[in-house]
Image: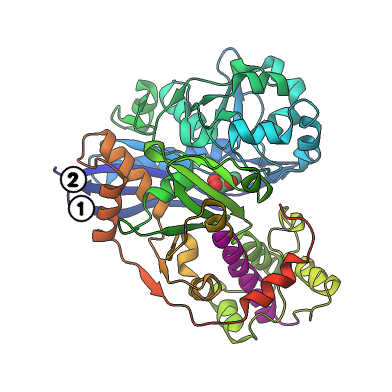
Amino acid sequence: GRPLRLAAVDLGATSGRVIAGSVGSGTLALDEVHRFPNGGVRAGDTLYWDVLGLYRETLAGVRAACAGGPVSGIGIDSWAVDYGLLDRAGRLLGNPVHYRDFRTDGVAARVSESVSARELYQVTGVQQLPFNTLYQLLSEVDRLAAAETMLLMPDLLGYWLTGNVGAEQTNASTTQLYDVRARTWATSLAERAGIPPRLLPPLRDPGERVGTLRPGIAAEHGLPELPVVAVASHDTASAVVAVPAEPGTRFAYISSGTWSLVGLELPEPELSEDARAANFTNEGGVDGTIRFLRNVMGLWVLSETLRTWSARGEAVELDQVLAEAAEAPALAAVVDIDAPEFLAPGDMPARIARVCRDTGQPTPRTRGETVRCIVDSLALAYRRTVRCAARLTGSPVDVVHIVGGGVRNRLLCQLTADACEVPVIAGPVEAAALGNLLVQARALGQDLPDLAAMRALVRATQTVERYLPTGGDWATAEARVDAMGPRV
Ligand code: LRH
């Protein structure tokens, strides 16, 4: 049909953007109309999100999109697990807390007294991460009595825009409060764990309407009363929609941003004890698919490293240190990038050096060597995870697709091909925004019947780069990391 112009609000942990996209048959074009930094705000002893800033920037972006031409819809996606609580009058109860805050330390261990880790996995299919919504809610259990509703971040912004509460399924599936087989809230499990089920709002599917921009907001911002569409509101689910996989290929994907989400698309959840032991998650995707994946620590360690150097007054450009890293010796020292010590903000170069020393490896001395250690370690984690996913599901992987900001890191893309020993197809960068636009477009009547049609449109319109494996002794490096301690 005639292309639709749509606003995709894509909120990442380190930056947010609003993209005006045109979607029609043979058309998928992006125009970034607004971008802003995002990140944790430490106040007192807590690491918060600037949620009102995110709301303000969302509106600023929608205004910018509308200023460029008529817009037919708005869709919002963001990182998973974090939420705001509403009281009985629908007012926000407290400022949402960042998943990297330490309020959840030790909570998971307490839950296992009322619900076993095994049962939790059987019902929810979710990997053990300290910041799962279940654990975050339990860390503030005293406050829950005053709360009526829990809204995940995109649903909270959607509520402010439209006045309607709900929980979009792909993001709900990350909470560890969602029954992955029944596709409903796991209410009895929630109750036993100590979470009042009234907090869990009605579920909505990607493609359903959230509602219409409230007249007061439309008037205040000079906007039309636009439909707000529930997209795959978990950014990773949106990114997987836009993986340009050829039909029939056996592909793994890496959604590469602050986190690297590494895994496979499956028709059904994989809930074996082996999958649980390997800490793979079963998150909901579009059209009933399952995202069987593992969180790998991702570009976070690199961005925190650059932040540490900048804070010391050492001017650092990402491209410059990556060029230095490319010249540094390969696989000189590797760390388990998923070790818990890399989760919280802080001095990553010091942590890397300490791990190298403690494991009897050469300590990186230059910036190039430090970055090489991080990028080698990431590629190694991709190798372990892709191979593990293939082993757990019995489905070999012929190609690895990388989407998201990490596509720009050409050293990492090449090392991923080397480590995984299969070709890598890298692109598109703005996969989450593209997936957001595609699901919106379908909801508003464009002819995109299934994931295959959406991916065909991505392939026809977006450019990708190919990387072929060139070798390296990854097996030895893998054995070195296997001998190290526990992972997140
Ligand atoms: C990536 C992501 C990931 C979650 C994490 C909290 O942005 O949504 O899928 O595990 O943030």
CA neighbours of label 1 inside 10 A, class few (<14), some (14 to 19), many (20+) = some
**What is the residue that sits farthest to the front in this orientation?**
394
Q: Nearer the viewer, residue 389 or 210?
A: 389
Question: Which secondary structure, mark 1?
Answer: strand
Query: Magenta-highlighted stretch: main secondary structure?
Result: helix
Amino acid tagged 1: Thr
Seen in the picture, residue 121 relative to 477 is either above or below; the reply is: above
Q: Nearer the viewer, residue 440 or 468?
A: 468
Seen in the picture, residue 169 relative to 451 is either above or below; the reply is: above
Question: Which secondary structure, mark 2?
Answer: loop
How many angstroms separate mark 2 from mark 1 (CA)?
Answer: 7 Å
Q: At which x and y percent is residue 263?
A: 51, 54
Q: In the rendering, which numbered label is found on residue 364?
A: none
Residue at 48%, 47% (x, y): give it. 236
Residue identified by numbered label 1 = 27
> Which numbered disc, 2 or 1, marks the residue that appears first in the sequence?
2
Amino acid tagged 2: Pro
Range of magenta residues = 365-387
**What is the residue that sits farthest to the top in this orientation?**
88
Q: At which x and y percent is residue 339?
A: 74, 58
Placement of the N terminus among the 4 image quadrants: top left
**Residue 396 part of the magenta segment:** no
Q: Nearer the viewer, residue 234 or 74?
A: 234
Judge whether residue 175 can be spotted in this image.
no
**Left or right for 65, reference 305:** left
Q: In the rendering, which numbered label is found on residue 3?
A: 2
Judge whether residue 19 can be spotted in this image.
yes
Q: Nearer the viewer, residue 6 or 434?
A: 434
Question: Contact, CB < 8 Å: mark 2 with mark 1?
Answer: yes
Q: At which x and y percent is residue 19?
A: 36, 49
